[in-house]
Image: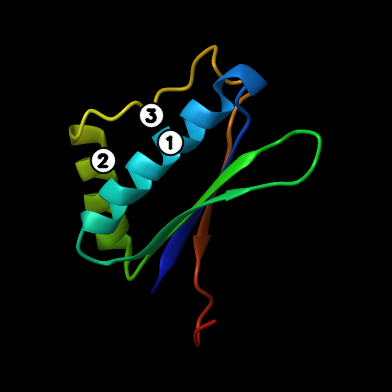
Amino acid sequence: MKVAMLANHYPHAAHRDAFIARVHRVAEEFRRGPGCLSAECWLTDDADGAVVSFVRWESEEAFAASLTAVQAAELDIAYDERESRPREIVRLEEPPGGA
């Protein structure tokens, strides 16, 4: 079963470009992991200016291994004062029978 993670991040305007670069670095690390199907960074065009990350894996095991690898890589992934509000993270599963 494929799994995915969708995360909306809300950096303050002063930190937006640096935050986008952070998301790209994390996406690169996710893509290195076996079983990662894609890792992308998107931007919303609304007033909130969210930075959206979307990552897909071929299995729950690949998701878990990938997350462990990103945490071990000591990347800057902590939520802190550079963000205006908490992140919204949704974990998704492919429905039975495929997409």
Percent from the top left, x then y, of residue 16? Answer: 58, 28
Residue 48: which disc? Answer: none
Percent from the top left, x then y, of residue 27? Answer: 36, 48
Residue 77: which disc? Answer: 3
Q: Nearer the viewer, mark 2 or mark 1?
A: 1
Q: Name the residue beneath numbered marker 1.
A: 21
Q: Name the residue beneath numbered marker 2.
A: 70
Q: Is residue 98 left or right of residue 67?
A: right
* Residue at image point 26% right, 47% down: 29
**Element type at marker 2?**
helix
**Element type at marker 1?**
helix
Pointers 2 and 3 in contact (C-beta within 8 Å):
yes
Q: Amino acid at mark 3?
A: Ile
Separation of residues labelled 2 and 3 (CA atoms): 9 Å
Q: Which of the two labelled residues, at mark 2 and mark 1, occupies the earlier sequence position?
A: 1
How would you rate the neighbour count of disc 1 (Cα within 10 Å): few for under 14, some for 14-19, many for 20 or more? few
Depicted 48 relative to depicted 84: above or below: below
